[in-house]
Amino acid sequence: MGLLLLVWLERTQRGWLAQRLAVFGSVPMFFYLLHLYVLQGLYQACVRQWGLNQGRVFGFDHVWQLWLVAAVLACLLWPAVRWFAALKARRRDWRWLKYF
């Protein structure tokens, strides 16, 4: 399935979805670190609200729920990732940006 999606995106490089996803590919380390901090913050908020548990409150019963949360998180983080990609493209004189 992933290979079919890759072929489809490769053929529609100028499409709306492909352009949106290319933003994530331009600054993958920034997205990776940002999503880890957001997930940690969400976890801490859940622990404060409901406490530690071993039950199913923080887990997912189905894989589609996990994919849905991942898609929503990516959509929410997209503006920050787009901003950082534009900063990285604009400021080539800042050498430390090449690591993100």
Image (cartoon, helix red, strand yellow):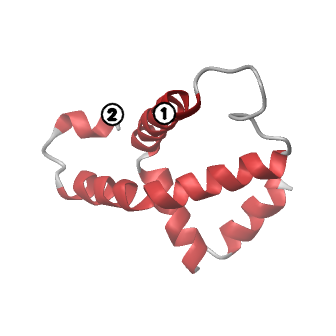
**CA gap, disc 2 to disc 1?**
17 Å
> In the picture provided, is 18 more to the left or to the right than 81?
right
Hey, which quadrant is residue 77 in on the image?
bottom left
Q: Secondary structure at mark 2?
A: helix
Q: Which mark is residue 99?
A: 2
Which residue shows up at 59% across the image and 58% down it? 72
Q: Observer-nearest residue: 65 or 51?
A: 51
Label 1, secondary structure: give it: helix
Q: Indicate which disc, 2 or 1, sits on the residue closer to the N terminus.
A: 1
Q: Is the residue marked by circle 1 packed among few (<14), some (14-19), or many (20+) residues within 10 Å?
A: few
- Give coordinates of residue 85: x percent, y percent: 33, 55
* Disc number placed over residue 36 in the picture, else none: 1
**Residue 6 vertical placement versus 58 (above, below):** below
Quadrant of the rendering where the C terminus is positioned: top left
Where residue 61 appears, as percent x and y from the top left, is 84, 41
> In which quadrant is the N terminus drawn?
bottom right
- Residue at image location 30% in from the left, 59% down from the top: 83
